[in-house]
Each structure stands twice: as structure tokens, then as C-alpha cells.
Image: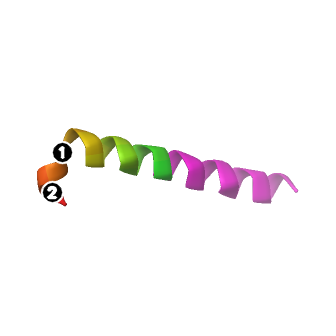
Amino acid sequence: MIVIELIAAALALAAVGYLVVALVKPEKF
């Protein structure tokens, strides 16, 4: 199940990064 874990980790990182960008540069949204 390593593949599923990698996908889950990638989605988690993408979600965190998206939240950080939304907080730092709210004018883009």
C-alpha cells in the first residue's frame, strides 16, 4: 500500500501548500 500512502502524502502537502498560499496571498483568490 506504499503507492496509496505516497498519493495521500502528496495530497496532504498540496492541501497545506494551498492553504499557506491562500493565507499569504489572499488577493489571488
Kindly identify the residue that appears in the image at 41 percent across and 44 percent down. Answer: 17
Question: On the picture, is 17 further left or further right than 7?
Answer: left
* Residue under the point 38% across and 47% down: 19
**Among all residues in the image, which is located at the extreme left?**
27
Give x and y (percent) for residue 15: 48, 52
- For residue 15, the mark is none
Q: Is residue 6 left or right of residue 19?
A: right
Q: CA distance from mark 1 to mark 2?
A: 6 Å
Per the image, the residue denoted by label 2 is 28
Amino acid type, callout 2 = Lys
Residue 23 picture location, percent across and down: 27, 42
The part of the image, by quadrant, that contains residue 24 is: top left
What amino acid type is highlighted by mark number 1? Lys
Does 1 sit left or right of 13 as displayed?
right
Question: Can you name the residue that lies furthest to the right here?
Answer: 1
Q: Residue at x 65, y 48 (%)?
A: 9
Q: Is residue 16 above or below residue 3?
A: above
Q: Is residue 23 above or below residue 7?
A: above
Point 78% across, 57% down: residue? 3
Give the secondary structure at mark 1: loop
Q: Residues within 10 Å of mark 2 (few under 14, many from 20)?
A: few
Q: Is residue 20 left or right of residue 2?
A: left
10 in magenta? yes
Q: Which mark is residue 25?
A: 1
Q: Which residues are magenta?
A: 1-14
Question: Are circles 1 and 2 on residues that touch, CB within 8 Å?
Answer: yes
Figure label count: 2
